[in-house]
Amino acid sequence: MLPLMMLGQGWPADYGGVMLQAFYWDSYDDSKWTNLEPQADELAEFFQLVWVPQSASCGGYVSMGYDPEYWFNNYTSSFGTKAQLLSMINTFNSKGIGTIADVVINHRKSLNDWVTFPGETYRGVSYKLLSTDICRNDDGGATLAWANQNGKTLSANNDSGEDWSGLRDLDHSSSNVQFVVKGYLNMLLNDMKYAGFRYDMTRGYAPSYTGIYNTAVNPTYSVGEYWDGNLGALKAWIDGTKVNGVIQSAAFDFTFRYTIRDAVNNNSWTSLSGSGKGLNMESNYKRYAVTFVENHDTQYRDDNDQQDPIRQNVEAANAYMLSMPGTPCIFLKHWQAYKESIKQMIYARQLAGITNTSTTAQQAYNSSANYYAQRTTGTRGMLIAAMGSTSYAIPSTYVTVLSGTNYRLALSKSTETAWASVPSGTRQDPFNVTLTAVSQSSGAQIVYTLDGSEPTATNGTVIASGSTAHIGKSLTLKAGLLINGTVTGVITRNYTVVNEDYGSYEITVYLKDPTTSPNNWPQVAYYCWDSDNAQQCGNWPGVVVTDTKVVNGVKFYYKTFTIIGNQYTLNFVFSQGGSTAGSHQTVDVTGVHETAFFEVTTQTNKYQVRDITAEYLPYLNVTTGDVNGDGRVTIKDVTDLISYLLSDDDTSVNLAAADVNGIGGITIADVSALINLLLAGN
C-alpha cells in the first residue's frame, strides 16, 4: 500500500466535473440549506460539486461565515441548523454531488477579548486555541500591544503570510494550531461527509501548511483562494503545497478570471489570444486550475460597493470558461440569471468529454474583425468557442449547437451525438424542442422516445435532423442518432411542464372574401407562426388559400389548424401573396387559439383587420334550419315553416333544411327546434 501522504493529489486528474458556488454576498435566503437541498435533482444533472458557505456559528450574528467563532460544537449559522446542513449534504451525496466546505483557518473570532477562544470537545477530544497561537504581528502589532497591557502572551512567530486586520491571525507553525485544524478538517470530511475543501485567504499563511493539512486528512478535492492574478505567483503557491514532491491542492485561476474579465468588459475578444492566460493553459498546472469568472468577492453588490464585476457578456464569459480545460466553477447569480444557456454550455462540455487536463489550442483570431476562436479536444469530440464577431465562419466539420451575444459553441461532427435545443428543466407551458444530429454521416436521422424508454430502430419516432418534437406534459425525452439501423449518441432530457396539454383540437380561421370590392385582392394567402415561433404555413408570404365557405350568406376563405396546448396560440398575416405580398398585407393578428372570423378593412400602410367572430360563429355549424333557402337562418325561416305546415304547401321551403330537429318528418316540433336554435344563438 502507498503511504497515506502519497494519496493526496490536490485534485483528480482528467476530471470532467463542474462546480457551483452556491452563494453570493448576503445570499442568506438563496443559500439556506433548506433551499439548496430541494434543488438536488436539478443540480445533479449539471454539477458534480457544490461549494457552500462556511457552516459553523459565527457567534449568533448574521454572517457570511468568514468570521468563524466555533469549529466543532455549534453549527447554527445564518444558513440553517446542523441537522438541516447534514440533511442537505446527505441528499447531495445520494445524488452524486460532493459538497465543498468553505474552510476559514487563516483567522478566527475570539470571544470576550482579543485572545480568548472557545474550548470545544468532539468525540471525547478537547480542542482549544490559545493566545500563544496568535501571530505576534497580528493586526499590525495592535494585538501584541493589547496582550502586553493585559498580561497575555502571543506566539513568538510573525505571520507566515499576509496580515489581516479584524480577527486573530493564527500561527500555523504552532503544533496546537495544527492539532486543532487537523481535528476540524477530519470532522468535516469524515463525520459531516463533506467531499473536500475550499481554503479561504491562503495568502494569509504559507502554502506548506495546506500541504500538511491535506496530507493528514486526504481530501479528494482541495482548492485554495490565493488571490493573485500573476500566473507565476499562482504556480508558486501550488508548488508550495507539495509534500514529498506531490502537489496537495488546486487553486482558483485568478489569471484566467482577469483575462476573461478584460475581454468581456472591453469587448476585446482578440485579447484572449496567445498563451499564458491562465493556469488552465499550463500543461503542468491545468489539472489544478479551478476556473471562474465571478465570485462573492468580485461581484457587484450595490452602488457603494461595486467590487470588480463582469459588467456585460456574462453568458459569453461562461461559455468560454466551460469550453476550456480546468474545473469550471459557476457563480450562483449567473446560474440563476442564465440557467437555460449555462445548462446547454455544460451539455456541450460533457458531450465533447472535456476534462481539466484536455488539450486546447487557438483556432482562429482576427484583430480587425474582433473575433477569437478556441478549440478544445475532449475524450469524445472537439468543442469550438467562437467569441466576438460572427464574421468567423464555423468549419463545416462542426455543428453550432448554441449561440448568444458574442459567443457560439460548436461541436465537431465526430462527437456523434444527438442534440436538443431545450435543456432539462421546468417550463410553464408546452413547447417544441428541435433535435439535431451532430454526426459525420450525412444521412443521420433522429429517433426519440417520450416515455423514458431507450430509442432503437424499432422503438421511437424517427425524424429528420432539425425537426421538432412536441413536449406537452412532464416526461423524459431520449433521443439518439439513427444511422443504417443502429442507434448511438443517445441523450436524455427530463422536462416538467406545469400547464400540461389538455388535448389537441382543431380550429378554423376564416377571412371574409377580400377579392371583391372594395379591396379586390387577386388571391388570398395565409402566413402563420405559433407561440413557439415555428412557421405553420411555410415561409413568407405563406400559402395561397382557395377553400371557401358561405356562412350566414357571406363568403369566407378558410384554413384549419391544430392547437396543441392550453397556452399554445397562432399568429397571422393575411396578404395577396406572390410578389405583391409585402405591400399588400395586413397587420399582425396574434393570440388566436379558437375558431375565428376576420375581415380586412381599410389600408393605412398595412391593411387593418376586424374580428367579426361574434357576428358569424353562431351560424357556423347550422346545417339545417335555412328553410327558405336564402343562405341565412332568421325569424323568416320560422314564419315560412309555419306557413308551410298550415298550408301544406311545399313550394316555399327547403324540405331537407326544414327537418330542424333531424328526427325525420316535418312537424310542429321542427318549428320549436328552430325557435330554440335562434334563441340560443346557434
Image (cartoon, grey):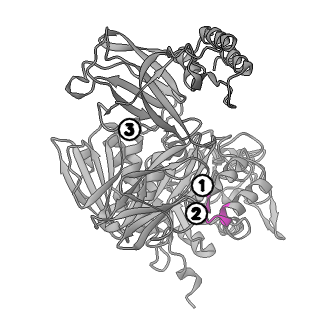
On screen, 213 above or below 35? Answer: below
Is residue 395 one of those drawn in magenta? no
Do residues under tags 1 and 3 come within 8 Å of each other at their CB atoms?
A: no
The residues tagged by marks 2 and 1 sit, at their Cα atoms, a distance apart of: 7 Å
The answer, for residue 118, to whether it is visible in the render is no
Residue 461 spot, x, y in % from top left: 47, 61
On the picture, is 561 further left or further right than 476?
left
What residue does disc 3 label? Answer: 535
What residue does disc 2 label? Answer: 452
The residues tagged by marks 1 and 3 sit, at their Cα atoms, a distance apart of: 25 Å
On the picture, is 376 further left or further right than 120?
left
On screen, 135 above or below 67? Answer: below
Q: Depth check: 151 or 572 in front?
A: 572
Disc 2 secondary structure class: loop
Disc 1 secondary structure class: strand
Q: Earlier in the sequence, mark 3 or mark 2?
A: 2
Quadrant containing the N terminus is bottom right
**Rendered image quadrant of residue 503:** top right
Q: Earlier in the sequence, mark 2 or mark 1?
A: 2
Q: From the viewer's perspective, is the residue at label 3 or at label 2 nearer?
A: 3
Do residues under tags 2 and 1 come within 8 Å of each other at their CB atoms?
A: yes
Q: Residue furthest right?
A: 124
Q: Depth check: 595 or 389 in front?
A: 595
The answer, for residue 417, to whether it is visible in the render is yes
Q: Of the numbered discs in the image, which one, if any, rests on residue 475?
A: 1
Check disc 3: other Cα within 10 Å, few if <14, some if 14-19, many if 20+. some
Look at 34% across and 30% down and name the residue there: 546
The residues tagged by marks 3 and 2 sit, at their Cα atoms, a distance apart of: 28 Å
> Which residues fall within the magenta stretch?
92-102
Disc 3 secondary structure class: loop
Q: Earlier in the sequence, mark 1 or mark 3?
A: 1
Look at 61% across and 14% down and name the residue there: 649
